[in-house]
Image (cartoon, helix red, strand yellow):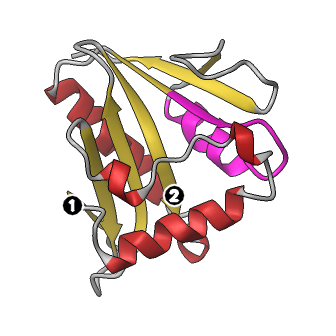
Amino acid sequence: MSVTIAQETPLQDDVRQMVAELNAYMTPLTPREFQFQLTVEQMATPGVTVFVARDEAGRAVGMASLKAHDATMGEVKRMYTLPAFRGQRVGSRLLARVEDEARALGLSRLVLETGEAPGFEEAWRVYERGGYAVCGAVLDYPDSGFSRFYEKKLTP
């Protein structure tokens, strides 16, 4: 399957639908107070870059965001691939695109927070295969036991 990845606005119906599907998937896995989701509107703010993967027909099949925190560190947010397209390296390609953008911005470290519960195994595999290492709590996230944190040092 051929997929193209481009920077796009999240303020479009198909991206809103993916965000809703991601939220619906995550809601039963982790207590709500330990879910740190960006809304579509927050994804559209300065400092957040959104990438959308589309199939040959132009259908949105995945997304990922980069949130810049300072001159050296960024955060991977809102990673999602439609279930029918999992196992086809869409997530890996999105993650690589986020990393390329982070390097272009001069960032040297990426971090992320994901769930620490059954149901997140596919996400863990994508991050670990991408060279991310489990680390302690990052940014202002609580070390609640409901989150798993990853980091990756970027080389120019």
* Residue 114 sits inside the magenta stretch: yes
The amino acid on which the numbered mark 2 sits, given as a three-letter code, is Tyr
Q: Residue at x 35, y 81 (%)?
A: 59
User: Is residue 1 visible in this depiction of the protein?
Assistant: no
Q: Position of residue 128 (x, y in %)?
A: 60, 32
- Kind of element beneath mark 1: loop
The amino acid on which the numbered mark 1 sits, given as a three-letter code, is Glu
Residue under circle 2?
80
Q: Residue at x 73, y 47 (%)?
A: 32
Q: Residue at x 58, y 77 (%)?
A: 84
Q: Position of residue 46 (x, y in %)?
A: 20, 40
Circle number at residue 136: none
Q: Nearer the viewer, residue 99 or 149?
A: 149
Mark 1 vs 2: CB contact within 8 A:
no
- Kind of element beneath mark 2: strand
Circle number at residue 8: 1
Q: Quadrant of the N terminus?
A: bottom left
Using the image, determine if residue 132 lies above or below residue 139: below
